[in-house]
Amino acid sequence: MRIRKPGRTAARLAIALLVLAAVLLTACGGGGIGGGSSSGGEAEKVRLEGKPSGSLTISNWPLYIDKGTVPAFEKATGVSVKYIEDINSNEEFFSKMQPLLQEGESGGRSIFVLADYEVVKMHNLGYLQEFDKSALPEFEKHLTASLKSPPFDPNRDWTAPWQSGMTGIIVNKELAPEVRSICDLFDPKYKGKVDFLNEVRETVPLVMKCEGVDPSKATEADWMKAIEKIKGAAESGQIRRFTGNDYARDLTSGDAVAVIGWSGDAVQLQADNPNLEWRMPTEGCMLWSEDMVIPVGAPNPTAAEAWIDFVYEPEVQANIAEYVNYVTPVEGVKPILAKRDPELAENQLIFPSASFTKNCSSTPPLEGEEEQKVIKAFDAVLNG
Amino acid sequence: MSRRIVPYFLLGPGTVWLLIFFVVPLFYMAELSLWSGTVGSFEFSWHWANYSEALELYDSQFVRSFVYAGTATVLSLLLAYPLAYTIAFKAGRWRNLLLFAVIAPFFTTYLIRTIAWETILSDESPVTEFLHAIGLAPSGHVLATSGAVIAGLTYNYLPFMILPLYASLDRIDVRLIEAAKDLYSSATQSFLRVTLPLSAPGIVAGTLLTFIPAVGDYVNAQFLGGVGNRMIGNVIQSLYLSQSDYPSAAALSFVLMALIMIVVVIYIRFAGSEALMGEEAR
């Protein structure tokens, strides 16, 4: 018994499906990723609507806030907050959000926290809104002087620093006592026991510093030369792997004895393993900041501004600083912490003195075609 | 009349599902792979160079992916065949328990199992020390090497090899083997001439189910690999998510798809479609 009836009916079905597919495609419109109508040009400005209320969605990095601040904000303002820790990498988050932002949507989120260079890129593409400063008195009053007018946003019209920090080296004091500089990471003694960060804007400038090049004045050739050096170390097996936050695993298991790493992480890692220590490289560190921004299409910008202003109250910020151990952008936190925990207030990683960071550089500018070339070259090293 | 329509109704839901979630995205990806420009200024321009660049820049990762996946497939086959054979013919009342043991790892997520391997293979672990002692890990570490990636791939895809092998071995009529013995064949001969050919459909299905997903895998290289062990899946991921170079990522995906298709077609030609479909194809 055969029920099969091949041939014509199957062909008809195929044609019908193709027609259906064509209809579906037309219906979906030529949307797709990128391209199309770019908003560009004049930046949108936040429009305030009375008192903050309703709900607010915030995207931030994991373990970047204490447990009490969100509930305290909800209690103080009556806004209900959805706080999502879904940022693990600047580029990755941008790539996931970009198609939405291009359409003028923010994925329901009203605040992103991203690195300086990433928010600059988003601003240039017209993806961010300008603040209405009338709702940001605490921010205006308490923002630390050194962060008041960065070159990319001289009046802080569309960025509000969340936390700052330093990129240097984290060593296991017992297993790699002599590692004090970026150059030491290339010592064959530690072959296969060194992790580098997969962040092009931090790893490459640090290696430039080892080569005696000032990252802020680096030419494309300097970038390429530093990348070559990293490539050599990767190929010889000196560098075990390129990591993000996951260097923490390698350090705790002893698989890595010295890594390029972030200051706040080290303070948290020390709690588990007192042998781990963040060191200021003799060449100096990289300084960075991450900013709160309000994307285009953000629902409830009024509540978003209320949030920004709230975390700039020194009492509130003290709780955050005490938990995250990065460099706080809020003036007036140190005396509050000194009362609670004098040791913490003296910690150079949380309240670095000018002399401590004198050799440090901020993230060097990298734009346009040069940026693409450098990122391509660095990614080629990452992908071996 | 209605009888003739029934099969189409049965095909319907699956077809619509694949159409919306496979064919349509595939069309968009094909279009995307021909865009040029950078984020914010992408435009469709029949930019075929995305394809030539993909092959030129990432040829070594392609080769590596196929070598890793091929090695893992062969290892899986060598590990799985005796196991499936034992379960099918010798396990007796233990059969269901053993089958359950094969499937059991699926109760934990793939990701967690791979991350667990990071701990098992870390430098200070007894496993690594043992491998070092017997000379299999001369550098003193296993994690962050190609060996670790291949081992991870083998482990993760092993059940996909065991199950089809078991299914085809289990279907073999034992009387055929007995007949071979009656005709004075040795154990080896009856295995090579009866059991092995009859289990060929399982071998072909198992190798395909292992090889195809393993080529595109990026989780194992991500967690168990180090410098110089990244596979093509990792490259696509980093092009898409860290460089925002969507067109190149799409082009690379198409090249990967095409290469896998070529390899599979050659393999099936070589292995014979009868082996794949079993007796039904005849």
Image: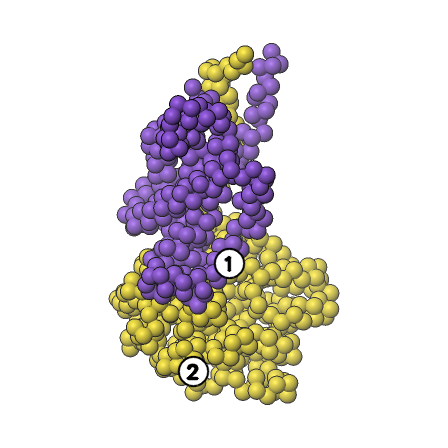
Chain colours: A yellow, B purple
Residue closer to the observer: B278 or B149: B278
Residue B11 seen in render? yes
Q: Is residue A72 left or right of residue A99?
A: right
| Residue A186 point in image, percent of width and height | 31, 73
Q: Is residue B142 above or below residue B30?
A: below
Tell me how far mark 1 sits from mark 2, CA to CA: 39 Å
Q: Residue at x 60, y 78 (%)?
A: A322
Q: Quadrant of the C terminus of chain A?
A: bottom left
Question: Residue A159: image x %, image y %?
Answer: 52, 68
Q: Amino acid at mark 2?
A: Thr
Q: Which quarter of the figure has residue A188?
A: bottom left
- Numbered disc 2: secondary structure: loop
- Circle 1 or circle 2, nearest the eye: 1
Residue at image x 55%, y 64%? A61
Q: Please rate how many residues cluster around mark 1, counting C-alpha atoms within 10 Å: few if below 14, some from 14 to 19, many from 20.
A: few
Q: Which residue is mark 1?
A: B116
The N terminus of chain A sits in image quarter: top right
The chain under label 1 reads B
Residue A305: x %, y % from top left? 62, 66
The answer to whether residue A149 of the structure is visible from this angle is no
Q: Which mark is residue B54?
A: none
**In terms of secondary structure, where does tag 1 sit?**
helix
Find residue B39 and report its horizontal and vertical position in percent.
42, 53
Q: Which amino acid type is marked by label 1? A: Ala
Q: Is residue B245 above or below residue B88?
A: below
Q: Which residue is mark 2?
A: A357
